Amino acid sequence: MKLIGLDPGLRATGWGIIDKRGNNLTYIADGTVRTPSRLGLAERLAVLFRELTAVLENYRPEEAAVEETFVNKNPKTTLKLGQARGVVLLVPSMAGLPVGEYPANVIKKSLVGAGHADKDQIKMMVEMLLPNAIIDSSDSADALAVAVCHAHHRRSLSLWEESKVAT
């Protein structure tokens, strides 16, 4: 099953695609959508929409996962991030994909075992779990982490559902 993880941002949105076959995870691709700061907000959101749509059309993932937004100290920044996140949720949903959402601490705990891991620890674990990954940026490393987290949670959910059927 092909999964895409998305790490939303207005300046840079990371995306990462993995394949999950049983317990095996395989790196497929990753990248970063960067929106020019010289553009207005609506134009930047349109760039994000077009670029992510192209990624989905090119790689055809079957499910998507998005990192939940944390509240920033600057309300204006939080609002802009929320608008970018809305586009990031909209694109896979419009493509008919189920979309999972995960808080940052759940993603970190899934990869590193601690909910307060730093970006370097996350990137190192992504590289260990996906040894062929050619990581584009810290944003795409975070997106790959979201995809891995989703793969782990999907596996747990499947095992739980199987055990319910067996009893």
Image (tube, grey):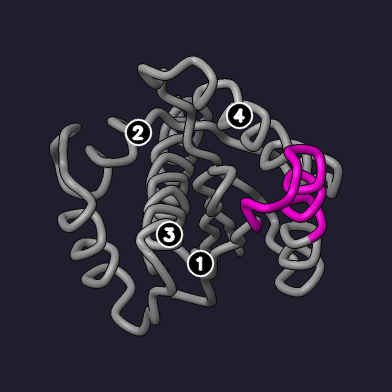
In the image, is residue 45 above or below residue 167? below
Q: Secondary structure at mark 3?
A: helix
Q: Disc 2 vs disc 4: which is toward the camera?
A: 4
**Measured Cα–Cα span from mark 4 to mark 1:** 28 Å
Q: Disc 1, disc 3: CB below 8 Å?
A: yes
Bounds of the magenta span? 36-50
**Of callouts 2 and 3, the N-terminal one:** 2
Q: Which residue is mark 1?
A: 18
Give the left or right position of residue 78, taking residue 97 as reference: left
In the image, is residue 100 above or below residue 77? below
Give the left or right position of residue 46, taking residue 3 as reference: right
Q: Which residue is mark 2?
A: 104
Give the left or right position of residue 100, taking residue 147 as reference: right
**Residue 126 belongs to the span the image colors magenta:** no
In the image, is residue 39 above or below residue 28? above
Disc ID at residue 80: 4
| Percent position of residue 79, x then y | 59, 21
